[in-house]
Amino acid sequence: MHLSIHTKEKPHICEVCGKKFAARGIFTKHLRIHTREKPFACEICGKKFATRSTLKVHLRIHTKEKPYVCEVCETEFTQNSSLKEHLKLHANEKPFACEICKRAFTQAGNLRRHLLIHTKEKHYECEVCGKKFTQGGNLKKHSRIHTNEKPFACEICGKKFTTRSNLRRHLLIHTKEKHYECEVCGNKFTQGGNLKKHSRIHTNEKPFACEICGKKFTTRSILKRHLLIHTKEKPYECEVCGNKFAQGGNLKRHLRIHTREKHHVCEVCGKKFTESGNLKKHLRIHTKEKPFACEVCGKKFTESGNLKKHLRIHTKEKPFACEICGKKFTTKSTIKVHLRIHTKEKPYVCDVCETEFTQNSSLKEHLKLHANEKPFSCEICKKSFTQAGNLRRHLLIHTKEKPYDCEVCGKKFTQGGNLKYNLLVHTNEKPFACEICKKAFTNTNNLRRHLLVHTNEKPFACEFCRKGFTRFYTLRRHLLIHTRKNLMSVKKVEKIHSK
């Protein structure tokens, strides 16, 4: 058998696929691919394996044994092959290059997967939704969306996942290990891939291009999200009401409307929450606790995340850029809302008139119209308002205070923002441009109102006939139709009775 290595003789031929082998033992192992035979079973969990060596590696999951240690960063591995692949990251070695586009990879498997992009072969089709895949493994993962199967469980907190990679990412929450540091800004990451993606913010590198419009992106996932604009595809469907969504996260948020699951109750006011962390944050409202203070202006916050966001006011930092139009934002949540302009997604629906909104705050404001709720009241004239900002602006009528003077025309203003807008009239500057049709405006309010033309959003609904309007004053003008009709009908009745 050993001599066949030197003679390069391969006497053992597989009758199924024609592959040749020099050693009988390797040939026997290979046959198990076709027969699906797995004679080696794990005594702890019962999982079966085709070879003794794979069972041996598997057992290390139970024993927590990681005999292979990286000499550079001391990361431990269960397999020598995993260590070898890891070392390529330190060496920046990519021995497997694509002959078509010259892109290089650390692993042969990654190159094989990459080649399918060029061939566009998708042999694996989902029987439920018809979606096609280049690899059987990807179809298997996809099928779990339909079956809701989550075979990978976290041993620390019990949370379950559809893929092993998602579980691996989750485990880093418990270990809090961040080995990968950005040399430019010092940000640390749990995974090398995340550091690589982050570095593109500094280098402005966009390696992923859209084949339809040529637009480039920093990550493959953002490109995928962008492609939904062209395909108009919304693969995530709500099983309760049939609403469709472009992103899984939006479906997840939407489902809370139906489930209303809130297990965590505040003992002070009785408010319920879906997560314990949210209850913990909420309790600070009652305790008035604000443990996070800004070192620049001294402002205090109940959450560290809010302090982090606030600091960007001082640093003028806008780390979240829209990959579609390039607009930058200070927070992830604002970019999320902004993206709905491009995807035309409106996940927040009014239960009364079924008007749809891109933001939950817009829905809340809209609901006040149905409830005729005006919680903010002026102490001087008792006029009530739906929003605190409207009350603040109203109070300036009583004080007659106009502290802001225009140096060009001498006009005075109650608010600095109004002075700023007035100056734009003199300079003819229109800094706020519509991302869809490029029309420019002097202020954000006019731009916001204009955007309703594209989104077809009508947040102001008539309580009598349910007709929707883009502006409140248009609704107010419309209401006169109903009041006139009512007056006319009253006069008719009076005439009949007088006869």
Image (spheres, rainbow, N blue to C red):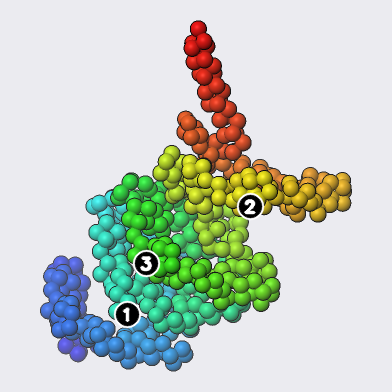
Query: How busy is the neighbourhood of tag 2: few (under 14 within 10 Å), some, or many (20 plus)?
Result: few
- CA gap, disc 2 to disc 3? 32 Å
Residue at image coords 36%, 70%: 166
Q: Residue furthest top?
A: 499
Of badges 2 and 1, the one in the foreground is 2
Of badges 3 and 1, the one in the foreground is 3
What kind of residue is marked 1?
Ile
Residue at image coords 79%, 44%: 425
Residue at image coords 74%, 52%: 415
- Is residue 438 at all visible to an observer of this figure? no
What kind of residue is marked 3?
His
Residue placed most toward the observer, 315 or 300: 300
Q: Earlier in the sequence, mark 2 or mark 3?
A: 3
Residue 264 circle label: 3
| Residue behind mark 2 | 389
| Residue behind mark 1 | 156
